[in-house]
């Protein structure tokens, strides 16, 4: 009788509690956050000074993406929270939150206690506006549909997003790769990407940081005898595939030997992103769309930090 292998989650009770905790609406303001809610009067900027800090705007945007609120509804939600907590805090207008989102430059904070040694990288499409898939499939499209491309670098061990870049759909994955790893920590050793990242720019950027880049070479790839030093990893991959037989089976063996299949965890992160926040963007300008996706990634990292499933393959 043939045995089947199944993937079982071994920390289900802990993971279940973390999923429940994601919906918690316990809200409080620490003394430090209250002090930092408004901006001091001695700020150095051109034009009218800001009334609210970046942390205040970020707080509002986080609540908006988690609870899927429109901007006007967000303002009312914040007013209700402050009133229930009996706090003497003013709430920014929804128009001010929208304007400030354009210039909000909050870096994704590292939430995992582990040092990041690997990064898996991939991209996915997010719809800005246009007709739904069902209507297009049944009746065809009648107006232009616009998409954006979200590029993510994910830690496969913790599941958190290390960096993200939102671009137009015409930008290739290989051109964005250097931006995803430009702030790479010294502990990073390997990056994984699919065939779209088998580009000179990707190998060059990895070599600058002393990182080994793992991507499947194209089927018609040839060894470059006069290649620069940063292409050595690619030449080595081609030699290994040729030594294993040079066919489809050899490529599969190479992927197993190099641990390439860890790259699929980036697709898992994409799925998690779209399941929680949807595949559409509320904002219409590219600058505000970038702020929206960054805030969503920050929120997703906070949810990931609550707990993730830990499983193993077993024979049943």
Image (tube, grey):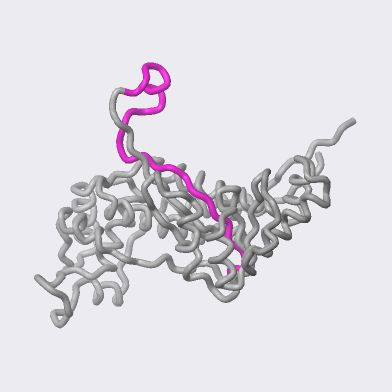
| Left or right: 264 as drawn, with respect to 285 | right
Q: Read off the magenta span.
A: 116-141
Identify the residue shown where x is 51% and y is 54%: 174
Nearest the viewer among 55 and 233 is: 233
Is any part of residue 306 visible from this angle? no
Measuring 47% from the left and 56% from the top, which residue is drawn there?
175
Count of numbered labels shown in the rendering: 0
Left or right of residue 287: residue 139: right
The foreground one among 130 and 9 is 130
Q: At which x and y percent is residue 118?
A: 61, 64
Residue at 74% x, 46% y is: 251
Quadrant in the picture for the N terminus: top right
Q: Where is residue 301? Give x, y as percent.
A: 47, 59
Single out the residue that lies furthest toward the right: 1
The residue most toward the front is 226
Where is residue 20? Give x, y as percent: 48, 50
- Residue positioned most to the bottom: 42
Q: Is residue 285 left or right of residue 148?
A: left
Q: Is 140 inside the magenta-drawn segment?
A: yes
Query: In the image, what residue occupies the spot 83% across and 49% down?
Result: 244
Q: Is residue 55 above or below residue 219?
A: below
In the foreground, 135 or 244: 244
Q: Is residue 174 above or below residue 89?
A: above
Q: Is residue 189 visible?
A: yes
Judge left or right: residue 275 versus residue 85. right
Q: Where's residue 115, x and y in %?
A: 59, 72
Residue 40, by quadrant, is bottom left
**The stretch drawn in magenta includes residue 182:** no
Q: Residue furthest left?
A: 48
**Quadrant showing the C terminus:** top right
């Amino acid at each position: 009788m043939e045995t089947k292998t199944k993937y079982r989650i071994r920390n289900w009770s802990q993971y279940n509690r973390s999923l429940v905790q994601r919906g918690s609406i316990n809200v409080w303001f620490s003394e430090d956050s209250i002090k930092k809610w408004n901006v001091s009067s001695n700020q150095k900027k051109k034009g009218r000074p800001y009334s609210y800090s970046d942390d205040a705007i970020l707080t509002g945007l986080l609540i908006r993406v988690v609870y899927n609120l429109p901007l006007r509804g967000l303002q009312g939600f914040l007013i209700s929270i402050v009133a229930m907590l009996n706090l003497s805090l003013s709430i920014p207008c929804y128009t001010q939150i929208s304007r400030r989102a354009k210039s909000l430059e909050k870096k994704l904070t590292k939430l995992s206690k582990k040092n990041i040694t690997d990064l898996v990288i991939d991209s996915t499409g997010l719809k800005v506006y246009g007709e739904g898939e069902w209507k297009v499939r049944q009746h065809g499209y009648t107006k232009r549909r616009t998409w954006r491309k979200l590029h993510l670098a994910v830690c496969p061990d913790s599941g958190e997003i290390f960096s993200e870049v939102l671009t137009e759909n015409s930008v290739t994955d290989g051109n964005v790769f250097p931006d995803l790893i430009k702030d790479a920590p010294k502990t990073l050793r390997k990056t994984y990407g699919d065939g779209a990242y088998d580009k000179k720019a990707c190998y060059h950027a990895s070599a600058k940081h002393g990182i080994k880049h793992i991507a499947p070479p194209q089927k018609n790839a040839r060894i470059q005898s006069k290649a620069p030093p940063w292409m050595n990893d690619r030449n080595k991959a081609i030699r290994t595939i040729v030594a294993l037989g040079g066919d489809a089976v050899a490529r599969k063996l190479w992927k197993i030997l190099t641990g390439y299949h860890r790259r699929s965890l980036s697709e898992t992160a994409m799925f998690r992103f779209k399941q929680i926040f949807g595949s559409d963007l509320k904002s219409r300008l590219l600058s505000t769309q970038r702020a929206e996706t960054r805030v969503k990634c920050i929120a997703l990292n906070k949810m990931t930090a609550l707990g993730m499933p830990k499983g193993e393959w077993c024979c049943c």
